Every structure is written in structure tokens, then in C-alpha cells.
Image: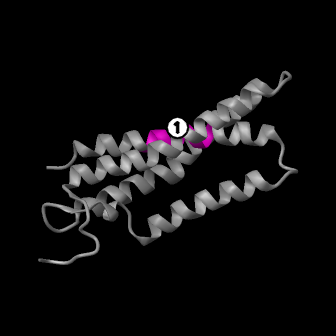
Amino acid sequence: MKSNNLSVIRTGKKGLLAVSSVLWSIPGMVISLKGLLAYCGLSGAGKILLLSAGSVLVLLFFLFIFAKVTRKFTDRIQSLPGEKNSVLLVMDLKGYILFSFMIALGIVLKSIPCIPEEFFASFYCGLGPALLWASLKFLRNIRSLA
């Protein structure tokens, strides 16, 4: 029996892109919901300005960060050898470090009491949809596989 620690669950390249999509959509949904709840909890006329700032953040996050990352991950998945690969190969080590860093940064930011709720409303309303957009890009990239 062949022993390979990374072969617990194996799937084709389209499956790896689908797994990537799920991995990006879960935090995207959670962060979007948190942003919406933070936004709804705000009072005052600045709500529209904050939502607008969040919309700009969506574009900036996606265009300058997540679009490049999704392309890089997709290219890496396409270049994997063989028909089926471990689902752990959806990201390389840098990808896992990036995800860990984003999670740790979120925890640290939330634990700082002097950061106003307006920041989280705007930031989360930008980051969450950008993650969801990246998730959809992974799904779209499935069509590019032969």
C-alpha cells in the first residue's frame, strides 16, 4: 500500500478549483455578514459614506490583491502533475501563510478596543465581497481547464 501524507483526499484540477472557491467563499460570507451587521448598527448620516468607502475597498482588494492571487493559484493548480492531487495542494505554503496572516490580523484588529465600529463596517463591507468575488473567479477558472 502506497503511503503519501498528502493523498488523504484526492481530486482533479477542477475539483481543486472548486475547493479553492469554497475556501474563499466561507470567510467572504462571514466577513460580509459581520460588515453588514456593523453597518446596520451604526447611526448617523455617515452610513452612506462608509458604504461607499467599502465599495471602493472591494474594487481595490480584488483588482490589486485577490485577482492576482486567484490567477496565481489557478496557474499553480493547472501545472500540477497527474490526474488527481491532494486537496491540500489548493494552495502552496505562501498561500497558507497568507490565509493564516489574514485570520490573525482580523483577530488582532477586533481585539483592539480603540478601533471604531465604523472602521469595521467599512473594511468588512469591502473585504467580504472581494473574497466572494475571488471565490467566483475560481469557479469561472474551472472553465479554462481543458
Q: Could you tell me residue 100's position as x and y percent?
A: 55, 63
Judged from the image, the secondary structure of the residue bearing numbered disc 1 is: helix
Is 81 colored magenta in this rendering?
no
Left or right relative to 90: residue 32: right
Nearest the viewer among 132 and 84 is: 84
Residue drawn at 33 percent across, 64 percent down: 88
Please identify the quadrant where the N terminus is shown: bottom left
Nearest the viewer among 1 and 29 is: 1
Is 35 situated above or below 65?
Answer: above
Q: Could you tell me residue 68's position as x and y percent?
A: 44, 55
- The residue tagged 1 is 29
Residue drawn at 37 percent across, 42 percent down: 137
Identity of the amino acid at label 1? Met
Q: Could you tell me residue 26's position as x and y percent?
A: 48, 43
Residue drawn at 30 percent across, 63 percent down: 76
Q: Could you tell me residue 111's position as x and y percent?
A: 78, 55
The segment highlighted magenta reads 125-134
Residue 74 falls in image quadrant: bottom left
Nearest the viewer among 21 and 45 is: 21
Is 131 colored magenta in this rendering?
yes
